Structure formats: structure tokens, C-alpha cells
Image (cartoon, rainbow, N blue to C red):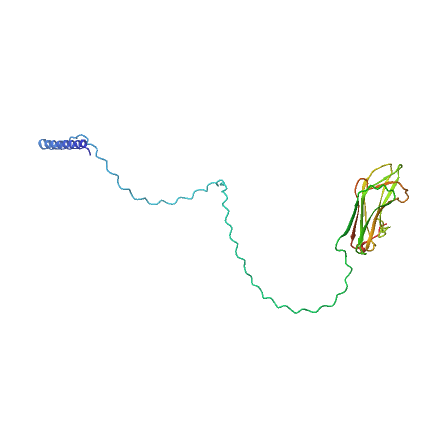
Amino acid sequence: MNIRSTLQYFYAALTLFHINVEGNSLKSDQGYASVCSGLPGIPGTPGHNGLPGRDGLQGHKGSEGTKGAKGSKGATGKTGPKGSSSEKGPIGIGQMGLRGEKGAKGNLGDPGPRGENGTVNSINWKQCVWNKQDPKDTGLIQECVFKKRHSSTALKVTYGATMRVQCSRGGCCGRWYVTFNGAECSGPMAIDGVVYVSIKSNVHRPRQIEGLCENIPSGLIRVAVHVGNCASYGTSDRESGWNSGSRIMIEEYPQSQNELSATFD
């Protein structure tokens, strides 16, 4: 409290005392009480805040609220770091059984019965090639010597070359065929092919003749290709191997399935 407030407080107290004295004097002299209101007093200094009160009693538990709507899917998190690989464990040791003693060597057995004739296990083949234009109308074109290993096998022969038959009139024919040591195949039949033209032409075309021949003995075999006349046709202008390579291919094949073979007319 400052000096000014103190003086104001003192002056107010003095005034109240004086009024009280005069009131009492009037009552004593005149025989009645006199009430006289004085000036309002100066407001007092505000008091200090009181101490905090105790906590109130705990209220009752409220009812459960309604379920909220499903939230949207969150963003995919980042891929975590790759874990370290574990070390390889030691190799386990299994229990090894004891090795038995070696038995005595047995006596040599009796020879077994003779087996059937074997088949060819490896491929036996040969190829003869040449590049020659042969205008021969009839006769030998080329020969290829082959060493046959077994008498029970068959020989497959393939002859490939360009062939041409030309004549000034229509209806000309030429025949190309294979021989074995000078004779055509008879097991089962000849290996041959024919070229026929019905009009005047001069066309060279690549052609191929092939077949299998059986009943040929083992040893050296002269495989040859010839050109000649067709049955019921005379000689005409023929040509082999024009402007291209020619070849004879020979292969030795195992014995065929005779029980399944058949003859067709």
C-alpha cells in the first residue's frame, strides 16, 4: 500500500469516528437516536485466491460409440534391406558300416551256348562325288567301289544329278539305273528311274534315284550308275550332270524285318 492510499484510509476512519460521537451526543441530549450515513468507504484490497478444491467423484462410464467407417488403404511401405545369409553348417558325419571280408574267387563256369548272329553296330558308308557334264546317251556314267562288311546286310544306294531327255519329236524316254558288280539288283528289284517327255523340250532338272538291295555278298562291290533306253523306246538325246555336282551315296544297313516283308504287284 502506497502513502496516498494510507492517508485516504485514515481520513475515512476519522470521519466515521466523528459521526459516531455526534450521534451518541444527540441521543443523550435529545433522548432519541439519530442515524446518519457517512461517505462510502474506499474498496478494500482484493484477497488472495483460495486453495484448489479436491477432485470430484468419477463419473459413470459412457455407452460405446458407433463403429466408424473403414479408412482408406495406406501407402505401401519401402522394401526392407536384404538380410545377411547364414553360414553353411558343417557336413554331417554318417555312420559307416564295417566292410565285409572278400570272398574266395569262384571256379570258371562252363562256356555258354553260341548266340545268334549279331547286327551292324556302326555305320558303314561311302560317298563318291564329281562335277562333269556327261552327254552320253547310253552306257556307264560313274562307278564307286564299296567294301561291304557282312553278307547278311543290305546296301542302300542313292544317285543324285541333273537329267535331261531331248528329242525333235514328242514321246522320248531315258532310263538311269544302278548295278552291283555289273548286274542289276534282284533282291528285291532293280534300282532305277526314267525321264519321259511328250513334247519337244530341252529342260535340265535335278533328280534322285535310290533304293535298298539285298542278297549281296561281303567284300568289294563295284556300285555303278548307267543310262540307257526305256522299254519299248529307242535311243534319244540324253545328258547327265549338266552344270552341277553329281554323287553316289552308299550305306550298309542291318538285316531287314523279313517276317514283315511282303511283295506287291
In the depicted structure, whether residue 160 falls above or below residue 152:
above
Looking at this view, name the residue that lies furthest to the left: 29
Q: Residue at x 80, y 51 (%)?
A: 146
Task: Give the x, y percent position of residue 77.
Answer: 49, 42
Q: Nearer the viewer, residue 219 or 3?
A: 219
Could you tell me residue 204's position as x and y percent?
82, 39
Quadrant that contains the N terminus:
top left
| Above or below, comparing residue 19 to residue 247 in the picture | above
Provide residue 118's location: percent of width, then percent of height: 77, 58
Residue under the point 80% across and 53% down: 147
Q: Position of residue 261 (x, y in %)?
A: 81, 53
- Drawn side of residue 68 relative to residue 141, left or right: left
Q: Is residue 254 above or below residue 199?
A: below
Q: In which quarter of the view is residue 200 placed?
A: top right
Q: Nearer the viewer, residue 87 or 38?
A: 87
Along the viewing direction, whichever of 81 and 12 lies nearer the viewer: 81
Depth order, front residue of 242/207: 242
